[in-house]
Amino acid sequence: MGVKLKGLILSLDNVLTDNAVIRRNDPMFEDVGRLMRFLQYRQIKPIIFLNRPRMDINGTPLLTFLNTLFKCDMDLVIAQELELPMKPSPAGVNHILDQNDWQPNEVLYMGNSDTDVRTAINSHVLFVNVGWFHDSVEYGIRFESPWEVARFVDIFCLRDHLWEYHIDKGPLQVYALTLGGWQEQPYKDYYDHARTALKEGNKNTDFWIKYLTSTIYFSGIYDKANYFAPYPTHQEGSGNNIIDQYLQPFSKCFNKTYLKDIIVRHTNVLSSHKHQSSRSFKKQLESISLNKNATNPRTGRAYANPPLNKNKTVLVIDDFCTFGHSFETARAYIEATGASAICVACIKTLARSYEQITQITVSDPYMPNKLSQEPTVDPHRMNDHVTDREAPYELKQRIEQYNSWDWPYSIIA
């Protein structure tokens, strides 16, 4: 289950105005107005959130002036007038959530300043980082125009279907956006689209990562984890640069630590997808260990003590899942520290059972381990864990809409 976007909380300066200046004939202001009208067209409530009251404009109250200018119906919340702690305290956002009966992941926070970032983080709300008037901060999902925000909202934030695939077996928690393969519809239409985007990087990478991050957000699983960690590719010493590029700023929105080098590939290994006939669980397990000197992203230096321990949860992110060998390897090493793992992939390969390890001993998760034999596994049939059969059809539709999206005619007419 998940939720959809219901509200957008926004700052005034450098979002609706250019350093408190409004130029009526500036095309950017026209697009800001279109964005506000578009939100209401999609039944999303825009709420301006200020610390203090602002002066009237030519004798007209600020909210009345802006609603007239942009031809919309925004609300205004002022912390000082409500005797609430000011930003970056979460009190104002929490007040807005309570008044509208919203959950944190049913809203976005749109801003441009360090104070906006801290407010969103403290409120556990996804930060929409806008740079259409001035350079923005480094956190959140960055947008250069109101048009980009509107497209993001329409394509990613109003979906009826989130995860097509989910294994829910106690400590085994595995999610995938969709299934993928070469032969069956609708899967074959977007399988190559995803594979090139996620393995090599191209113009479609932005779509897939935003689809993944928005699903993590609206399903709420981001809030179950203390850490985010990418699973490395198949070459020794490799990380996962494509996932790092997008997921690291996303994780910062919720004050989740992104451990880009906690899972280490110390030996080359074959891909289960490409070499299914020679796949070996043992080789995968023997090619991975955890990094005792993982980098603390807040300091840029190694942790004095390894960060994983009891009562901690790691959200492990990979692009594709075939038999689950990567995820099971990550789980085995992470659980050996006392922590737990939630595993998330963009695509689960069609017609392949997920092979759960039933018993294994990792003697030291921070060192390479040698196994005497292949571990025993408990296969989970793919069809038993398809939880939303409409998800792939919605995904296909969103791909088609993404590259041709434009303002609805009623917004620009």
Image (tube, rainbow, N blue to C red):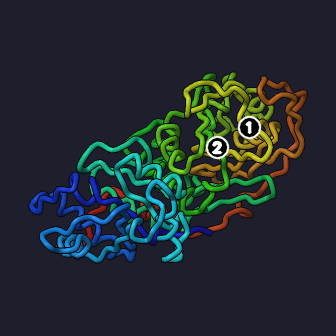
Q: Nearer the viewer, residue 352 or 77?
A: 77
Compared to residue 70, the image places residue 249 above or below, namely: above
What residue is at 66 percent from the left and 47 percent from the top? Answer: 226
Q: Nearer the viewer, residue 307 or 367?
A: 307
Quarter of the C terminus within the rendering:
bottom left
Q: Which mark is residue 227?
A: 2
Q: Which amino acid does label 1 sit on?
A: Leu
Q: Nearer the viewer, residue 263 or 126?
A: 126
Q: Position of residue 189 (x, y in %)?
A: 47, 56
Disc 2 packing (10 Å; few <14; some 14–19; many ≥20): many
Quarter of the N terminus within the rendering:
bottom right
Say how many tags the image has: 2
Q: Residue furthest left?
A: 25
Residue indicated by mark 1: 308
Q: Which mark is residue 229?
A: none
Q: Position of residue 371 (x, y in %)?
A: 87, 28
Disc 1 packing (10 Å; few <14; some 14–19; many ≥20): many
Q: Distance between the residues labelled 1 and 2?
A: 9 Å
What residue is at 40 percent from the left and 41 percent from the top? Answer: 138
Among the 4 quarters of the image, the one containing residue 69: bottom left
What residue is at 12 percent from the left and 59 percent from the top? Answer: 23
Q: Is mark 1 on a helix, strand or loop?
A: loop
Q: Let me know if residue 288 appears in the view.
A: no
| Residue 17 left/right relative to 83 | left
Q: What residue type is labelled 2?
A: Tyr
The answer to whether mark 1 and mark 2 are in CB contact below 8 A is: yes
Q: Let me know if residue 169 appears in the view.
A: yes
What residue is at 22 percent from the left and 70 percent from the top? Answer: 66
Q: Position of residue 145 (x, y in %)?
A: 27, 53
Q: Which of 248 and 22 is in front in this view?
A: 22
Compared to residue 34, the image places residue 242 above or below, namely: above
Mark 1 / mark 2, whichever is N-terminal:
2
